[in-house]
Amino acid sequence: MSDIKLAEAPPGIEGSGFFATSFDKVIGLARSHSLWPLPFATSCCGIEFMATMGSHYDLARFGSERPSFSPRQADMLLVMGTIAKKMGPVLRQVYLQMAEPRWVIAVGACASSGGIFDTYSVLQGIDEIIPVDVYVPGCPPRPEAILTGVLKLQDLVKNESLRRRNEPEYKELMNKYGIQ
Amino acid sequence: MDHPIIAARHELTETTTLNLGPTHPATHGVFQNVLEMDGERIVSGVSTLGYIHRAFEKIAEHRPFYQITPLTDRLNYCSSPINNMGWHMTVEKLLGIQTPKRVDYLRVIVMELARISDHLICNSILGVDTGAYSGFLYLMEQREHIYEIYEEVCGARLTTNIGRIGGFERDFNDTAFAKIKKFLKNFGPVLKEFEELFNRNRIFIDRTAGVAAVDAETAMNYSWTGPILRACGVDYDVRVNEPYSSYEDFDFDIPVGTNGDIYDRYLVRQEEMWQSIRIIEQALEKVEKEPKGIFHAEVPEFYLPPKEEVYNNMEALIYHFKIVMGEIDTPKTEVYHCVEGGNGELGFYLVNDGGRSPYRLHFRRPSFINYQMYAPMSAGMLLSDAIINLSSLNVIAGELDA
Amino acid sequence: MGKISNQTVLDKLNQQFGDKISLAAEPYGLLTFETTKEDIIPILSFLKQDEELKFNFLTDITGIHYPETALPIGVIYHVHSFVNNVRVRIKVFLEEINPVIPTATVLWEGANWMERETYDFFGITFEGHPGLYRILNVDDMTVFPMRKEYPLEDPNRVDKKDFFFGR
Ligand code: SF4
């Protein structure tokens, strides 16, 4: 017997030889446990992410085994570090290149709000240019905090309805950011 | 002689423009280089920087002295304690504060740990870029142990904010010393193993030896400092040339290279880690001999008193108020102080007008100055060599852009 | 400590340049003096090429702004002699509007980015510089942010406006 824990099956109707549940739940379950991260690391927080990925904390335990460095094949954009105004358009470009469904985690005070850098050159939070799903506080957050952020995102992903991204609210949100 | 077809093709060859960065996975950090490529070879390049420009120098003009320490953390975040100490020492030099020997030795311990963690990242990442991921995993574990020591000393892992102007905010506790000793015991064998993996590894040597060689003349012309200058054969180390924090009491060697290529840079960094271990061992011995319990200089006008005292002691409260409100006169003058950071001479040029915050503070950031040669020296290199050249320069984005 | 004293350096400079060197001082043991923009390059190259002094290493170039003085914009050079282990700090002050100074890239390649940074922050034009454009800030910036009159925070921010207390 190995001690690998399997994910709980979603609630459904079970009988001999069949198991019925809704698509939403199965797909949500599958998605949430295989989030491919795209680390967008610019500064100090990126170093903490290195620790999170490294052998000690091991992000791979949560289904994020493969850090994808191409935005096309990633689900979860982790923005770590200060985003200067010069960097803003680049970040937006990366976000636009990701395929739907896509999620964003803002790791650290700088990505969430500009942090200690209330200056002319720093973007005061990435949510000015792209929508964010989870904010992780800290300067830098401990690796444990980054892991919690990922787990929180997994919860979101698990419970997201399949139609969410076609709904008018979502379209409106995207329009707010000028993304079609 | 080229095959005629190949020769003919050369005539017609068009160069391609390759935009490397700012978020390229092979460059660890936000560096952009627009390269003109002829096949795999780089013809010329232009670096763009400023992608995380955070206006440190402008912020510093608006912050009191003791609040600038957190800013220095974020310069070279792989070795924050060195920056912190460098800043404290600059202010101490300005104010004429003499720190007790024990404080100096404790600072040396923390700074050398930081140097180890800086070089360790650089060398293991160099391994990753040449295709050896295992070294990274070996050494990252050790860096975690260094972080545990920082945590014991100051409570933070990465952006440490260790110490105050005049000393430390609290004494090192027994656990901290125990952890340092344990680290020294365990780190040597791991580093040895790492060296066995790399030093005589055929692939590694083929990739690095003779690549991006720089002669001493050029390196000095470009104002290089730190391990990469020493790899070119110039024995300039601020710790020896202008000893600070009682470095003159220690017995250590400065490793220098001969060719200035990537392999030499790797070896110099590797040897510096061994020397750092030596220094820490000596420092531990010296701390034992000093009277216990001294962890800051007796300068109540500048050293923030501990919180318990502020609440229970009139005098401490007054000093606390005065320091925080900036009511203490400071000399109207200017000072340049430098320390040997992870990447070279980290200088602080402080112009003071007697006020609460600096009139002007300029950081001489080694990464910024070292990186300058990157684009010119890439010309003629293979793209894959240019990538490992970047990791061997160990340019830290935070320090590059300030 | 250095192998030659600051006085030796100063004597040699005085001998060569006489009254072009003013306000010599030694804050914290670092020889500091002022000169003019016409003389800066000759002085630097003398320091670099002199057989005895050998100031062969350019540590830093930076700027400073003292508004409301006659010559408000300063350029500050730190040079270092590895052989003798002494440093020298040289200051040149320029006018507020359109300050111009010759480039030091003719002596050290390393001056290139330091001067670009100084230009970026203070708007000092280095004459003869091979590519003087902004280095850290965005290219379309029109102001020079390290000048004292420019605020630290982004002046266009709206989210900090408070109904009762203003900004
Ligand atoms: S939040 Fe703090 S640690 Fe993270 S990038 Fe910003 S300054 Fe650095």
Image: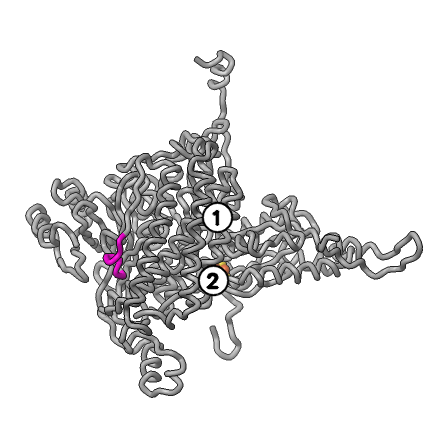
Q: Which residue type does callout 1 highlight? A: Val
* Residue C110 visible in the current orientation: no
Q: Nearer the viewer, residue B74 or B305?
A: B305
- Name the residue rendered at 55%, 55% in the picture: A56
Query: Where in the figure is residue C158, as x and y percent of width and height?
Result: 52, 67
| Badge 1 and badge 2 in a common chain | yes
- Secondary element under disc 1, as helix, strand or loop, is loop
Query: Where in the figure is residue B304, as x and y percent of width and height?
Result: 34, 76
Span colored in magenta: B245-251
Q: Which mark is residue C63?
A: none
| Circle 1 residue | B30
Contact flag, marks 1 and 2 (Cβ < 8 Å) = no
Q: Nearer the viewer, mark 1 or mark 2?
A: 2
Q: CA distance from mark 1 to mark 2?
A: 28 Å
Q: Chain of mark 1?
A: B
Mark nearer the N terminus (1 vs 2): 1
- Name the residue rendered at 90%, 58% in the picture: A14
Q: Name above or below for residue B66 compared with residue C103.
A: below
- Name the residue rendered at 49%, 15% in the picture: B8
- Secondary element under disc 2, as helix, strand or loop, is helix
Q: Quadrant of the C terminus of chain B?
A: bottom left
* Residue B56 visible in the current orientation: yes
Instruction: Reply yes or no: does residue A84 show up in magenta.
Output: no
| Circle 2 residue | B148
Instruction: Reply yes or no: does residue B247 show up in magenta.
Output: yes
Quadrant housing residue B106: bottom left
Q: Is mark 1 within 8 Å of ligand 1?
A: no
